Amino acid sequence: MNDREIWIYDEETYKNFFLLCAINVDTGRRVKFQISSLFDDRKKIFEWLKNDVDTMVGYNNLGFDYPVLHNLLVNLMDIKASEAAYMCYSRAQDIIEAPNPWFNMIKSPFRKQIDLFKIHHFDNKAKSTSLKLLEFNLRMKNIKELPYSPHNDLTSEQMLEVIDYCDNDIDATKLVYEQDVTQKAIQLREELNNVYKIDFTNFNDTKIGEYIFLQKIREKLGKSVLGKTYRDKITFSEIIFPYIKFNSEPFKKILDWFKSKTITETKGVFSKIPFEELESLEGHYFKQKTVGTQKTLNVIYKGFQYDFGVGGIHGSIEPGIYESNDEWFIYDIDVQSFYPNLSIKNNKFPEHLGQTFCVIYNTIFEERKKYDKSNPINKALKLSLNGAYGKSNSEYSELYDPKFTMSITINGQLLLCMLSEKLNESIPNGDIIVLQINTDGITIKVKREHRELVEKICKEWEQECKNLTLEYSEYDKMVIRDVNNYLAKYTKGGVKRKGAFEYDLELHKNYSMLVVPKAVEAYFMNGIKPEDFLRSHNDIYDFFKRTKIPRAYKLLKRREGQADIEEQRISRYYVSNDGYSLIKEMPPLPSKVKKASETNDPDEIKELLKPRNTNVEAGHLCTVINGEYDEKEIRKNLNYDYYEKEVFKIINKIE
């Protein structure tokens, strides 16, 4: 790199004030540029970019900050400063109101842009995460929301507050940038840029995988546009593998049901099923009525419920503690690269791509074996293997063919049912217990005397299933709440945590009250009483929670005899012995607003338009701490009984 360096930046736009703040990631040097009737730092911004900046890092900077800055540099350098500030505000509003954020992207920025929002895929609805939520997760001293509406004209004093707020956002973005997961993601993209000669800088993992796969297919087919395959209907009997066979009545019935089914869309195909469509399964499934239909497709075999879904099969034994001992052991059996190998071994592919799809799939699978797991190419090829199946059900992808998607997921579920049936029929009754089944594997508790038989059955299943490969793990203990929430202690050391038991979370998850899963694990794995764990736990932050209130709502602190105090919508708090009730104030229902518009009675109108209130922690007091705090004072005020009850909510469901 030349003398120019990496800077993290953020912008604020008001009608009479534009602000750009930045910090150098290596030296910590800060800069602030303002444009208003009082300041005109446009030339300074230009000189800074020219002389000091090589790379700019932001949070949603591709979709917001950089387009505003680019417009400033290209179009607003020769007008009055106050007019330039207003035009920056106007451009920002256009961006916010645009129907698609991609319309705002600048294809050739003056300086390289790294967008952490894009890299972590926080622009995906399922992972959508604001910088404020990350401030909580990353334990920022100060969690700050924008102090004034961007539609306001600011006074000089208010401008100072906004500068302080922007600096805090810079610190938050720097924290995200410095996370190990972020640094590894950036490094991976830099290495892949060199290998594939493609700019992956701001691609999320799924997009990287899809792009590599499509690039290889384009090269093989010699086409730049691959197309898609749309389906008016999908007949399941045409896609079920001929070697799928069952001996037991329940599984025979479910196989026949699948073969009789034709669908016109994939969404919700295994849920809200009319009961008349399930007559052939009568007596073999668990009825879960919802709106006059069956909630989810399932079948009962030897007392265990197998639930079918578009993503894969799942099922779990009753909540409880399941342990290995001298007589029994717990075996977790997974299919290696299950969905990719189903395609490769069975020659299944999106119709418009033909068998070349399987050739490429297999090439990538075999190529990945050549690289150590620490090698970035290994990671890229893994992303490609996983992304190819996932994108086959996306209308926005050139891998799209919903028939291919359903052929993989339906056959995958039925094949795991075959494995379960083989194990249950070959091992004497009472000597095997199915604990869980989930997407790509099955977990069983079985008597040790049958270990060789289990592995023999698994080998036979592999051969029958066109040489799929099974992988094995052994657990000393499983603590199960349900299929998505469990603890598993590996025999070779280490603990697998899922759902409510997780505390080493991905950045976009909710980090509230992490002391609870830690206390639950300490109880089940080490025999430590929750009350002892909680009172001796030395990380006070693990007790904190956060609110997430929609923009149209308010968060209020309420105490009898005092006026309500409005807090930030995203606030950090803990449940305390002394404090306030935290109230979420919501607008009146649309039906009441409509009714109010139809009456002339002032009292009735007032009653109808009264905001709705709900208590964030019903029956408990809370203390909000969005700034610095005194740990000793918190410990004096902490409501340990509340947290202990939260721990026992999980424990009691299991015990």
Image: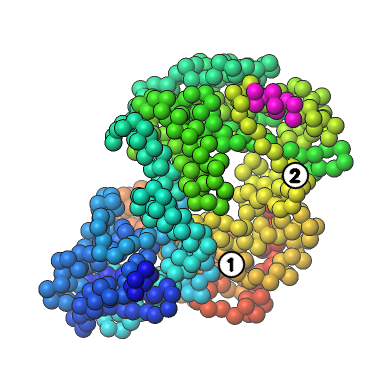
Q: Which residue is mark 2?
A: 475
Looking at the image, which residue sits at the far left?
79
Q: Mark 1: which amino acid?
A: Phe
Looking at the image, which residue sits at the far right?
326
> Eyeballing the image, is 301 above or below 139?
above
Residue 335 position in % (x across, y down): 62, 34
Task: Answer left or right for 509 relative to 599.
Answer: right
Q: Quadrant of the N terminus?
A: bottom left
Q: Is residue 277 magenta?
A: no
Q: Which residues are magenta?
A: 455-463
Q: Residue at x 80, y 57 (%)?
A: 527
Task: State the residue in front, 246 or 157.
Answer: 246
Q: Residue at x 35, y 36 (%)?
A: 219
Task: State the residue in front, 632 or 352.
Answer: 352
Q: Residue at x 51, y 43 (%)?
A: 382
Q: Secondary structure at mark 1?
A: loop
Q: Residue at x 67, y 77 (%)?
A: 636
Task: State the residue in front, 578 or 390.
Answer: 390
Q: Which residue is mark 1?
A: 544
Residue 80 position in % (x across, y down): 13, 76
